[in-house]
């Protein structure tokens, strides 16, 4: 047997775990696209009928809000339920029985969340502009920022899936959070339009910063003021990673 | 001299914050190169014991050592040397069969070439070569189990733990699995086999550990265990259902009569009681179509041990 250097093996592991996630997504690709796009796109169309003529800024906020909605739907709602189902189905016994690192396993789950969230994020971005005849600003820095934004939300989905006592409970919590965050926090509306209590709650949700960053970047472009928001998202991502790491019942440590 | 692979000492495990004892003071040693069967009814505590042996759970009391190292403190090293086949749902259902085995091999540290070579050999050995590009989820239940077994076989594990490997398999595939187990053992792999299928396991295992209610009832070589019931014979009676009660009443004084299949009763009788029992069952009024006397099997040992435990 050829000896592989432990350091190289870490990257092989991560690469193979990512390939497994890609293979899973490949098999479900059309379902994921349909599932992830249908709700944000329908909401987008509905709001178009409801609001009629609105300001460009208002329309941009709706498109960006629905992009965040799509991340919430796939990265938190569906992913949380998926992980909960897998946890109770004993799927993770397979991974825990292999000589792989916990950190790589968690990263592969987050990667899966990003893979499943990205299609609807892009679909809403393109379709929203066509539907509302709004032109959003695009620059390449949007890509890493979008990945960070998705990552910070996906962490909540993974955490929810692992913490929940059963899949039904995950479903209830995920539905509640989806509705609450989408409609009662500054995802589609400005934070100043919300009652003060909801404003305070909004500050502890990563989606508030995700919506802010996306709004700024897609309407104005990258500005130095976004560093602070990006830093907050990095903190959210680190906290959710640490919590996942603590809560996953991996092998005995 | 026999080299111990696993040493379990007074292993006790509680679930639900101490309210349910799944394992109760189990002590046993598993030696290099043997096939050991862990037998017991559902809920006996077999899987909990195995999960402590692979480092997924830590014993509440006692110790589990793998090659003289405490498993709960060295799980990374332990999982490198063992392969575990679980009863739980196969995690790679959305992959092609070759991908599931190949990727597992890579995750176990095989190079691309080794993983590819072993994947091809395993698919061939399992008779699944024709399905290599099929999604695991599109296979039948039995075929899925074989692919899951394939992911256990890939790699260079010195110990393989198989939890009910023949579940959901048809007789031909079951035979194939037993053959593979024998082959692996012949090459020096230690096999730990958890199964309900006592009759089939009897043909491959060297030693047996019987567990019930979380306790180890016995551990010994199959032949030695059988000798415990050597003074008895197993009587199998085939009769019409309507006669069952009458037969049970007649034989009451000779031992416990059990219904094992639709038209089959079985009981263990002392050798000195054979003549009077045969005389009794030859009564035409009992409608017995056939009977046979057989030497005790591992199943009889198992039943006897369970009876003993209940009477204690």
Image (spheres, coloured by chain):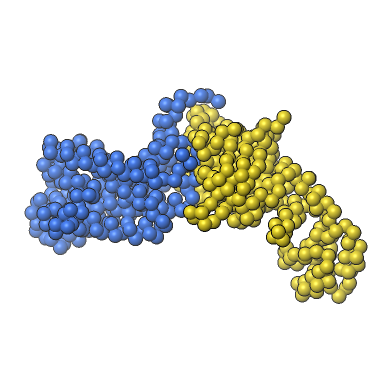
Chain colours: A blue, B yellow
The image quarter containing residue A165 is: bottom left
A232 sits to left or right of B200: left
Estimate the x, y position of residue B126 in percent, counting from the top left: 61, 42
Q: How many marks?
A: 0
Left or right of residue B34: residue A36: left
In this view of the protein, can residue B73 be seen by the observer?
yes
Q: Nearer the viewer, residue B148 or B8?
A: B8
* Side of A127 relative to B84 (left or right): left
Where residue A244 sits, quadrant-wise, is: top left
Q: Which residue is painted at 12% across and 36% down in the image? A: A224
Viewer-closest of B140 and A177: A177
Q: Quarter of the image containing the C terminus of chain B?
A: bottom right
Whether residue B248 is situated above or below residue A139 in the rendered picture: below
Q: Position of residue A186 (x, y in %)?
A: 17, 53
* Residue A130 screen position, x and y as percent: 17, 50
At x 66%, y 49%, the residue is B216
Residue B215 left/right relative to A9: right
Position of the N terminus of chain B by quadrant: top right
Q: Residue at image x 88%, y 62%?
A: B273
> In this rendering, is residue A20 above or below B44?
above
| Res B146 seen here | no
Residue visible at 78% across and 45% down in the picture: B224
Residue B116 in the image: state x and y as whole percent.
52, 32
Task: Depth check: give the residue in front, A60 or A247.
Answer: A247
């Amino acid at each position: 047997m050829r000896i592989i250097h432990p350091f190289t093996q870490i990257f092989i592991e991560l690469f193979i775990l990512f390939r497994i996630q890609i293979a899973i997504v490949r098999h479900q690709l059309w379902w994921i696209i349909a599932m992830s796009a249908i709700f944000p796109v329908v909401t987008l169309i509905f709001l178009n009928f409801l609001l009629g003529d609105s300001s460009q800024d208002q329309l941009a906020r709706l498109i960006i809000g629905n992009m965040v909605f799509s991340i919430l739907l796939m990265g938190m709602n569906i992913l949380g339920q998926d992980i909960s189902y897998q946890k109770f189905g004993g799927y993770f016994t397979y991974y825990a029985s292999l000589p792989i690192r916990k950190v790589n396993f968690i990263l592969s789950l987050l990667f899966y969340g990003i893979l499943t969230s990205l299609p609807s994020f892009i679909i809403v971005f393109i379709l929203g502009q066509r539907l509302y005849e709004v032109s959003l600003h695009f620059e390449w820095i949007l890509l890493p920022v979008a990945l960070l934004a998705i990552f910070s939300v996906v962490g909540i989905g993974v955490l929810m899936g692992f913490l929940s006592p059963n899949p039904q409970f995950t479903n209830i919590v995920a539905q509640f959070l989806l509705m609450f965050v989408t409609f009662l926090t500054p995802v589609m509306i400005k934070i100043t339009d919300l009652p003060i209590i909801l404003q305070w709650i909004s500050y502890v949700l990563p989606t508030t910063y995700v919506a802010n960053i996306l709004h700024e970047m897609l309407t104005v472009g990258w500005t130095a003021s976004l560093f602070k928001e990006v830093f907050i998202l990095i903190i959210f991502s680190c906290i959710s990673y640490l919590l996942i790491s603590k809560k996953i019942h991996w092998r005995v440590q | 001299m026999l080299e111990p692979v696993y040493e379990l000492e007074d292993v006790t495990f509680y679930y639900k914050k101490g309210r349910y004892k799944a394992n109760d003071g189990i002590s046993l040693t598993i030696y290099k190169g043997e096939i050991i069967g862990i037998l017991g009814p559902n809920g006996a505590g077999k899987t909990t014991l195995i999960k402590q042996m692979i480092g997924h759970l830590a014993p509440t009391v006692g110790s589990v050592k793998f090659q003289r190292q405490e498993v709960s403190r060295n799980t990374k090293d332990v999982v490198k040397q063992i392969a575990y086949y679980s009863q739980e749902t196969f995690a790679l259902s959305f992959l092609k069969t070759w991908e599931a085995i190949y990727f597992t091999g890579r995750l176990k540290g095989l190079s691309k070439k080794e993983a590819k070579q072993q994947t091809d050999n395993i698919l061939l050995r399992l008779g699944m070569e024709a399905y290599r590009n099929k999604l695991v989820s599109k296979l039948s239940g039995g075929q899925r189990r074989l692919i899951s077994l394939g992911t256990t076989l890939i790699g260079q594990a010195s110990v393989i733990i198989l939890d009910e490997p023949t579940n959901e398999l048809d007789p031909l595939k079951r035979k194939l699995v037993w053959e593979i187990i024998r082959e692996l053992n012949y090459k020096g792999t230690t096999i730990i086999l958890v199964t309900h299928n006592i009759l089939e396991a009897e043909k491959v295992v060297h030693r047996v550990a019987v567990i019930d209610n979380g306790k180890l009832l016995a551990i010994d070589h199959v032949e030695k265990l059988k000798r415990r019931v050597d003074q008895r014979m197993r009587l199998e009676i085939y009769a019409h259902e309507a006669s069952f009660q009458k037969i049970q009443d007649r034989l009451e004084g000779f031992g416990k009569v059990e219904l094992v299949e639709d038209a089959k009763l079985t009981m263990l009788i002392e050798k000195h009681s054979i003549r009077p029992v045969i005389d009794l069952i030859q009564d035409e009024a009992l409608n017995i179509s056939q009977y046979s006397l057989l030497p005790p099997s591992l199943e009889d040992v198992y039943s006897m041990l369970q009876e003993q435990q209940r009477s204690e």
